[in-house]
Amino acid sequence: MWKTALLLAMALALPTVQVPSTRTPVDKSYRKMLQGVELFKREHALAPQATLRFRLLQRQPGTDMTGIQLKLVGDTTSMAVPVAADNSFTLDYQEQLWREDAAVLANRKTLSMTWRADVRSPGVPEGMRRLGDLRLECLVGMQAGLVSNNAHLFAWLDEFLRSPDKVCSDPNGNYLFFTERPLFAITLQAGARRASLPFHALYAGNPPPAEMPYCDCQVMLDSSYFAPVWDRSWPDDTLLAFEYMDDPPPASGAAPQDRNAALASLGPPQLSIHFDSGREAWLYQSAPPIRLDPAADGRPRLGEHVLLFAPDGSTLKARQRAP
């Protein structure tokens, strides 16, 4: 017993030595990002004419996204990576950096930015995205390890989050995409087929406020969406058409003049989301008159009435979606 006590006392008396780490768990791996590039080449049939770039997006408030410098840092060597004006870049294979398992580092705090793959096919109209491009973005992004949700919060999803096939082929994969401007609605178009995405596909599914610091959408909530990359009933050439919050409202479609009028005529919404801009979106849901089979993702089919309010409470937009 006395030996155990002596050893414990000696251990407590020893100074603590801090070993510096060359990288944090959320630094991007050069190897993994190049594996994403290789996956892009293997799955190029999803977007045969597309090109791949990686892109940096703002995640935390106050992050300066101008003049970002990027470099690859290995054990014995480093190399600068050119960054375009839109904060996009490409990566090429460098033997020494690959062998040293280099980190991809920016001159910004690691969690101040969101990293994404950016796959673009030529000929896609402005204000639209091609679904095959987004499918490839999801696969590349997952393979490259670009999603940086907090490990302790999502530990139970760790295996799921690490698998591109699982994430990008499952309705619950929930890989986030982003637009340049705040969203109000998304319509899928494939030939004569049209469908509006449900409210839960926008705004990162409305995560609880306590989870926002751990979401890649932290300051881009109103620009985030889930594309149905998993739903193969929509072909790769399907186009996503975006309606933005600041687009002019359609001439038709009556809506309450303000929040108070909406409360008086419709009652409290089933769901409301307040954005950093001061805008607010309200969702009203209604069951169809006859029972319908669940949607492709297993959710019940419900009618939707969505209202968008300005910071002063006036109504900016309204839309309806059939079950």
Image (tube, rainbow, N blue to C red):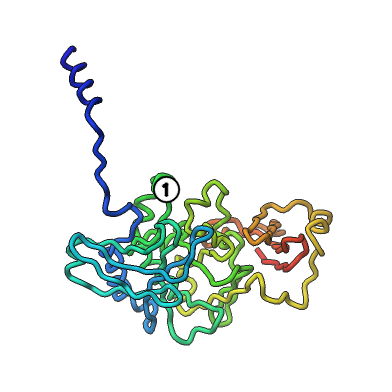
Among the 4 quarters of the image, the one containing residue 35: bottom left
Q: Residue at x 22, y 29 (%)?
A: 14
The percent coordinates of residue 19 (x first, y second) are 24, 44
Left or right side of 141 for 99:
left
Q: From the image, which quarter does the C terminus lie in?
A: bottom right
Q: Residue at x 33, y 52 (%)?
A: 25
Q: From the image, which quarter does the N terminus lie in?
A: top left
Is 36 or 304 nearer to us in this picture?
36
Q: Residue at x 48, y 71 (%)?
A: 233
The percent coordinates of residue 301 (x first, y second) are 62, 59
Q: In this view, does 108 lie above or below 134?
A: above
Callout 1: helix, strand or loop?
A: loop
Q: Which residue sits furthest top?
A: 2
The percent coordinates of residue 36 (x first, y second) are 31, 68
Q: In this view, does 204 lie above or below 229?
A: above
Left or right side of 58 for 322:
right
Q: Is residue 51 above or below residue 67?
A: below
Q: Name which residue type carries label 1.
A: Phe
Find disc 1 in the rendering and name its residue: 154
